[in-house]
Image: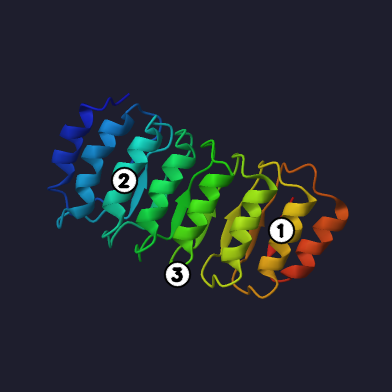
Amino acid sequence: RLAPADCTAVVRFLQSCTQISLINLFYNDIGWLGCVEIVKLFDNANCQLHSLNLSVNNIGAKGVEELAKGLVNNNKLRRLHLSYNNIGDKGVEELAKGLVNNNKLRSLNLCFNNIGVKGVEELAKGLVNNNKLRSLNLGRNNIGDKGVEELAKVLVNNNKLHSLNLSFNSIGVKGVEELAKGLVNNNKLRRLYLIGNDEITNEAKIQIQQACPNCKVTF
């Protein structure tokens, strides 16, 4: 498994490669110091990095802060996977800053990251003016009904997001009601995952399906 120090050599090698567009460092231990090195690829003119998987790397909030700095002016990265990194609300707050002006990222995976209401609130702010993100995975976090309410506000005017995963997030009837309000006039979302939110009633399921008839909802 790669340690933080190993990332220096990896990045040095990749900086001279023009044909590598995908880097998969899943299940290593690069930590936040590794992210300091990885982010150097974002600004490298020779590197054509389009997809980056850093899932299960113990990067935490500090690591995301480093990545977010690189995302601000990055015009190449399309997919970013950060699941199982315990980034928490603070990490999402930093990431949201990078998303505000980012006009290239299409897919963001943040599942299993101990994200709560505050984190989703900050993420929603970052998505208000972001018109490029197509897929957002927030599965297996702790956003609850209040967190969904914050996301719903963004979905009202968001015309780009195609897939949203909110599975296993302790979402109940109230959360679904707010989500339905946000989706009534949204004609872009095509896939919505609400698996494992056991408090959602059959009535609430019908409500969300009626709110977005063109969207496939999976419970």
Camera sees residue 56? yes
Quick check: marks 3 and 1 in contact, CB under 8 Å? no
**Relative depth, front residue between 206 and 48:** 206
Q: Residue at left 77%, top 64%?
A: 209
Q: Residues within 10 Å of mark 3 (few under 14, many from 20)?
A: some
Camera sees residue 25? no
Q: Is residue 82 left or right of residue 179?
A: left
Q: Is mark 2 on a helix, strand or loop?
A: helix
Q: What residue type is labelled 2?
A: Leu
The chosen color scheme is: rainbow
Q: In this view, does 90 lie above or below 205?
A: above
Count all numbered tags in the image, as a single digit: 3
Q: Which amino acid does label 3 sit on?
A: Asn
Q: Is residue 114 above or below residue 178?
A: above
Which numbered disc, 2 or 3, marks the residue that appears first in the sequence? 2
**Residue identified by numbered label 3:** 131
**Residue identified by numbered label 1:** 217
**Residue identified by numbered label 2:** 67
Q: Is mark 1 on a helix, strand or loop?
A: strand
Q: In this view, does 127 lie to the left or right of 76?
A: right
Quick check: marks 2 and 1 in contact, CB under 8 Å? no
- CA gap, disc 3 to disc 1? 22 Å
Q: In this view, does 166 lie above or below 188?
A: above
Which numbered disc, 2 or 1, marks the residue that appears first in the sequence? 2
- CA gap, disc 2 to disc 1? 32 Å
- CA gap, disc 2 to disc 3? 20 Å
Q: Which amino acid does label 1 sit on?
A: Val
Q: Where is residue 128 in the image (x, y as percent from the top left)?
A: 48, 66
Instruction: Work out which residue is located at the far right of the displayed protein and give it.
Output: 203
